[in-house]
Image (cartoon, grey):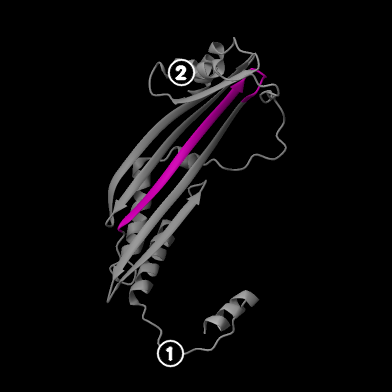
Amino acid sequence: MTGYIVEKAMQALKNYDQSEVYVSDTVVNTVYIDNSEISNVETKHDVGMMFRMTKGGKSGKASVTLSGPDAESECISMADSVLKFSPIEEDLNPFAYPSQAKISQPDVFDRKVENITADELRELAKRVISACSDFKDAKVTIPRAQIRVAATSTHTLNSNGVDTEHRSTLVYGHFTSMCVREHPGEGIEFFHGTHLDMDSEAIGSSIASKAYNAAVCTEFKGHRKMSMVLTPQEGSEMLFSS
């Protein structure tokens, strides 16, 4: 999809000294947990485009979300308007030229993330809920949580010969927990990475343990001697304040 959009846009920009098109296509899938129950599973698909061009020492740039058939032409029109009202730059740098990458491409793409289904996303959430609720029969709940996975593809093409594409994926999780004993205790965990290697059971057990330990903890009323390392400034502040 992005390849067709980029090629079409470059044809519209051929009357400029330099032109460049950048297109980003992202699909985001999210599952939400409320009060230890799956409340929603949603999918969002966004396609964005950015144009930039130079002519006669002036430059213009604009970006849009491709939400309609006229978005592309409107973006070019906006970028052209910016160019017309821009001052002439004496030291205007040229756009990038084709070159060989100096570092190896990082492994930031997971096809399992790209092809994930709503049922698979629900299953990840169910494992977190189950591991949390089964912890020591402590009745730990998950007030709020979400698991979000995204797959992004980008395509850059310019009049100097650059034609490059890149794909990446992202996995993000935010989890909270609550356990009530004599007083409430809370727990929290985060996960972020580029591959679908999140251990749902471990996360569920971790937030349950944190909430339970916070709920059963008591104030320390005894005395304990321990060694401390203080900076000279901290030591002087303690002496003057005592």
Amino acid type at mark 1:
Gly
Instruction: Answer with left or right where residue 48 lies relative to residue 134.
Output: right
Secondary structure of the residue carrying numbered label 1? loop
Residue 84 falls in which quadrant of the image? top right
Residue 240: percent from left, percent from top: 56, 82
What residue did someone put label 2 on? 72
Residue 77: percent from left, percent from top: 48, 15
Q: Residue at x 28, y 74 (%)?
A: 181
Q: Is residue 198 visible?
A: no
Q: Residues within 10 Å of mark 1 (few under 14, many from 20)?
A: few
Going from N to C along the chain, the mark reached first, 2 or 1, is 2
What residue did someone put label 1 on? 222
Residue 180: percent from left, percent from top: 28, 70
Q: Residue at x 65, y 13 (%)?
A: 56
Q: Residue at x 35, y 66 (%)?
A: 186
Q: Residues within 10 Å of mark 2 (few under 14, many from 20)?
A: many
Magenta residues: mostly which secondary structure? strand
**Residue 184 is one of the magenta-drawn residues:** no
Residues in magenta, as a range? 143-163
Q: Is residue 186 visible?
A: yes
Q: Residue at x 72, y 28 (%)?
A: 99
Residue 105 falls in which quadrant of the image? top right
**Residue 149 is one of the magenta-drawn residues:** yes
